[in-house]
Amino acid sequence: MELLKQAIREKGKVLSSDVLKVDYFLNHQIDTQLMIEIGREFAELYKNDGVTKVLTIESSGIAPSLMAAHTLEAPLIFARKKKSLTMNNDVYVSQVYSFTKRETNDITVSKDFIKEGDRVLIIDDFLANGQAAKGLIDIVNQAKAEVAGFGIVIEKSFQDGRIKLEEDGYRVESLARIHALKNGQVYFTDELSK
Ligand code: 5GP
């Protein structure tokens, strides 16, 4: 997605060979116009897939998922990283190792919101080693629902998240795929031969 690649080029900061900071438009300040375009793109990609729920993880997955869920006319559910006081015990729980925080956290989703028979589109801001994705798949499986596929805003293709998901038979749609982060520069996979 050209608009997204342009935002990454102009406003992303390469922190190291494996971490990209996108606080200017996705992870802290939010570019709402760009989020709307991203959401529409995910909806277009999955419009024929019978999606009944969109699932993401708080907080950075919410903004890019909103327009997707709206366009697909499906509710948007975000997994919580901390159990809320108002949440009862009727929750699905899974464990996720955070790539950026280097710690394992429980994520929870109320059993009210995903049910057997649902087809769930999972959306996240980044795909690195697929840990968040794995936790979200686990929750969908606990609900006896089905994963329709993944919508990823930024995929770091040099990490193995996509490979693992594809090996398990999941469809992965990423709007920007990064081949490498080197010398402060972002190299996209579709621009390698240019
Ligand atoms: P994974 O679970 O696939 O290993 O990592 C994906 C999760 O870690 C995303 O939900 C995202 O929050 C975070 N993450 C992974 N890599 C990056 C990165 O390069 N930059 C930022 N800002 N977040 C990342």
Image (cartoon, helix red, strand yellow):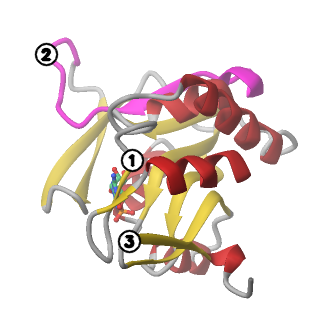
Circle 2 packing at 10 Å, graded few (<14), some (14-19), many (20+), is: few
Is residue 154 found left or right of 194 in the rendered image? left
| Residue 1, x across and y down, in percent | 71, 52
In front: label 1 or label 2 = 1
Residue 145 visible in the displayed image: no
Is residue 104 or residue 50 the one in the foreground? 104
In the image, taking residue 98 as reference, residue 174 lies left or right, namely right
Q: Which residue is mark 3?
A: 129
The span from disc 3 to disc 2 (Cα, nearest Å) is 31 Å
Residue at 16% x, 55% y is 101
In this view, 111 is above or below 154: above
For disc 1, the neighbor class at 10 Å (few under 14, some 14 to 19, many from 20) is some
Is label 2 in a helix, a strand or a loop? Answer: loop
Q: Earlier in the sequence, mark 1 or mark 3?
A: 1
Q: Which residue is mark 2?
A: 85
Of badges 1 and 3, nearer the viewer stands 1
